Each structure stands twice: as C-alpha cells, then as structure tokens.
Image (spheres, rainbow, N blue to C red):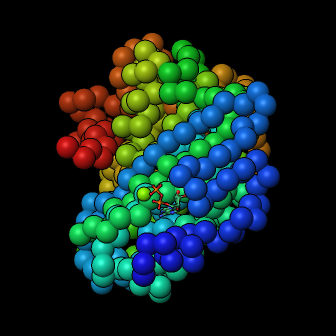
Amino acid sequence: MHEFELIKTIFDRHGANHIQADIIKGIGDDAAVISPPMGRQLVVCTDTLVQGRHFFGEWERVEALAFDIGYKAAMVNLSDIASMGAKPHSLLLALSLPQRLNNKTWLTCFADGLFSACADSGETVSLVGGDTTAGDMLVLTITALGFGEHIVYRHGAKMGDDIFVTGCIGDASKALDDIRKHGTSPIQDKLYRPMARTQLGQELASVAHAMIDISDGLAQDLGHILEQSGVGAHLYLDALPASDELAKLDLPTQLQYQLTGGDEYELIFTAPKNACLPTDCPMYRIGEITTTQGVQLSFNGRLLDQDAPYPFLTYPTLDGFSHF
Ligand code: ADP
Ligand code: MG
C-alpha cells in the first residue's frame, strides 16, 4: 500500500471525529495537538519491538501473528504508563515496514491488535500520530502519553515497606520456552496478550511508595527499586504466586521462572505496613524492604544460606533479561 493510503485507511480509524475531546488534532498534520488536563503531569514513554529480538524472526510467524504483535506493542507501553500511576491517553506509532508485510490483510490485523489492546486497557486511548518508513525487518516503536496526579517512582521505597506483586508471575517465560521447544504452549496468551494493570496502577498511585512493571524479571526489576531507593529487600520465595500451570513444575524450576522471567507486566510495588490497598484485584505480599543492601531470600521463614541454600541444592539465580 502507498504510505498515505496506508495511514488513512489503516491507522486513522477515527478520522477527524476524535473520541477524546482534548485531542485538538490527531493524525493528519505535522504533529498532534493535545489540550492537557488542568493540574496533571504529562507522563511519556517509548518502547521498541524488533523482529527476531522481541518477537519471532521467521516471516511465517510474523505474518501469522500480526494481531498479537500489534496488541503487545501497544500493551507494553500502556504498562509503563500504569507503573507510574498515570492514566494512559494516546499513542504514537513509528513503523519500519518490510515490503512483505505491506498488504491490507497484515496491516489491518496488526492495527486491530493495537486498537484492541487500547480498548482492553479499559481506558480511551487514541492513536494520534506516528511515522511510516520502509525497512528490511519489522521494527515498531510506540510512544505512549498519559496524565498523572500522584506519580509513583522507582525511588520511593522506604525501610519497613511491604513488597507486593499484582498477579501470578513466570507464565510468559514458561510459554516462550514451550513455544521454542514445541511450537505452541497452553499458556501462550500470557506471552502474546499481556494485560497492563491500567486501573490498578492509578488506584495504587495514592498508596504505593515505589512501583515498577515486570518486563525483565521480578528480581531484576525489584532490583531497580532497591537501587534507586537505596534500600534492600527480604523476599519470601514461598509467597511468590504461581498459576496452576506453573505449579505443576518442580519448585526450583518454578522459582526460576518467577524470579527471572520477563514479559510479565504485573506491577511490583511497595507500600507502608497496614496500608489500605485496593481489594478488587489479587495482590500478593512477597517481601519487605530492609536496610541491608541487596536481596535476601527466605523460604517458609528460613533465610537461605548462599553455600547451603536449603531446601534447594543451588542458590536461585536472580539475573533477568539484558539486551547486551
Ligand atoms: P511528515 O512528513 O510531516 O512527518 P507524514 O507524512 O510522515 O508527515 O505523516 C502524516 C501524518 O500521518 C502525521 O500526522 C503522522 O503523525 C501520521 N502518521 C504517519 N505514520 C503513522 C503511523 N504509522 N501511525 C499513525 N499515524 C501515522
Ligand atoms: Mg514522516
């Protein structure tokens, strides 16, 4: 499809009739124009997905997964806005599009995925602009805009805070391993269709001291909170929530997925003891903030020894995903 036809028919779904009154100008001019709500702060983030790195490299798979790729690209950005305690507002999409995928079927499926993620977030989120170029591989960069009142940073954790996670973790990386081995997984939706904690993030904004979403693994992402807050943590391994599927695995394997598996998009947050937390979503207390540096692990109340980590044979790995 020609660039202008593509933008008009595939991405400019709402045309001039914006469903958000504060979007003065969306797609169609040199830049979008938004009227920011009074007294709110603009929260903005961007994330790139590269074919062969963030999703499969094989053309057949990329062709078959058009919807999921669009869905996830939008959702990971909505998750970053949620983890700041802000309300998502709009997206921009920079697309490097290989000739092979430049057809109406693929592009429509991809856009359906992107707009479905916006709708599933439970907020009104519009695509207000972007850029389209030809490329050898599919590369997607989405920028998300949101507005927040009480922003929750990584640096706010305080000694004595409880540490919580907002749902079961480890399934996305287990699904990825399944797919690599068998081509499919009974829990592949956890990988392909993550769900950003959009409402919960906003509800937590007034209680959480620090917050982050899990993109690279629980231990590593919690590590960012600890480092930026200048504190340590005691993590209760027995309290990490596992789905029924993950609970079928032996304990060390299960823990490895929970501690180091990325692509989860659940939130980790810290809050003062006895804080009044939202009750409409499962939340698991998985540890507490301490003054000792780094992470101490315990199992059923007993601290794990680095040299003799009973009940495990080896001390659990805490590394997460890294690009380099
Ligand atoms: P310019 O040449 O000034 O950068 P473009 O011709 O690239 O403008 O884009 C025209 C309009 O279409 C702009 O409003 C831009 O934001 C929008 N646009 C371009 N590509 C996309 C895309 N992939 N998704 C959404 N909007 C897009
Ligand atoms: Mg341009």
299 or 229, which lies in front? 229
Image quadrant where residue 132 sits: bottom left
Measuring 30% from the left and 82% from the top, which residue is drawn there? 100
Measuring 47% from the left and 18% from the top, which residue is drawn there? 229
Tell me if 178 is positioned left or right of 279 in this view.
Answer: left
Residue 160 visible in the shown view: yes
68 or 1, which lies in front? 1
Tell me if 279 is positioned left or right of 266 in this view.
Answer: right
Tell me if 41 is positioned left or right of 49 in this view.
Answer: right
- Residue 4 at x, y = what percent? 49, 72
Q: Is residue 119 above or below residue 5?
A: above
Image quadrant where residue 65 sits: bottom left
- Residue 301 at x, y = what percent? 48, 31
Residue 75 visible in the shown view: no
Picture quarter with the N terminus: bottom left
Measuring 44% from the left and 33% from the top, which residue is drawn there? 222
44 or 269, which lies in front? 44
Tell me if 291 is positioned left or right of 161 in this view.
Answer: left
106 or 237, which lies in front? 106
Image quadrant where residue 317 sits: top left
